Image (cartoon, rainbow, N blue to C red):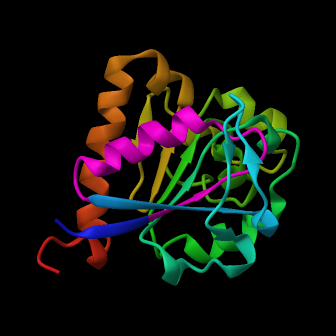
Amino acid sequence: MNTRTCAAFIFDGFSDHELAITVAGLHRRDNIVLETFANKGRTATSRTGLRTIPHTSLSYMSPDDFDILVLPGGQQWEKGDNLEIFPLITATAGRRPIVAISEATLALADLGLLNDIPHTGIHPDHFERFCPDYEGASYYKSQPCIDAGMIITVDGMAITQSGHGMLCLFDTLQNIIAPHHELFDPAC
């Protein structure tokens, strides 16, 4: 079984349960090593109160350091926080798969990455409320998760409240990883 690196951005208020479900889905295909990182490498306290010490700082991260980038939800995305990760998201887009869950989809909308691809999230009005330049409303789909190639968007409520939603995410993660990146090729 190949070992792959999943880099997850953590911050005060991140949704640890969404991160756990996503990593569990990735483990169904490969041996995943979870590497967490935070702005300035400081301890982050999740939405549920779990204190997490990151492996490294955001300033040391590059798309060359991981195989998949996971952005868990959290209300900080709605507050306009977490802007410091935007350059890494931009550098990763098209090079490595990105999984944005729940409120983290707002970051992709802010960067214009959802303007012309199918995607999901909390609700279409959620994007318009927090992302004034969002132009992807016609591509929004009310589904637990959407595979748009190198970008996977996830409705966090759908995966945590429904077994069907969780299975949809697991299947999507299994299907997207291998075909879209040579590091996930079982022949490697």
Q: To which quarter of the image does residue 178 belong?
A: bottom left
Q: Is residue 186 magenta?
A: no
Give 150 or 171, whichever is nearer the viewer.
171
Q: In which quarter of the image is the N terminus?
A: bottom left
Instruction: Please report the bounds of the magenta region as a residue range.
Output: 6-30
Q: Position of residue 98 (x, y in %)?
A: 50, 59
Q: To which quarter of the image does residue 2 belong?
A: bottom left
Q: Does the magenta stretch include residue 16?
A: yes
Rendered position, 55 above or below 16: below
Q: Where is residue 44 in the image (x, y as percent from the top left)?
A: 75, 49
Residue at 45% from the left image edge and 71% from the top image edge: 96
* Relative to 95, 108 lies left or right: right
Q: To which quarter of the image does residue 85 belong?
A: bottom right
Rendered position, 131 above or below 53: above
Say whether residue 119 is visible: no
Q: Quadrant of the C terminus?
A: bottom left
Q: Where is residue 160 in the image (x, y as percent from the top left)?
A: 48, 23
* Relative to 73, 147 lies left or right: left
Residue at 62% from the left image edge and 77% from the top image edge: 91
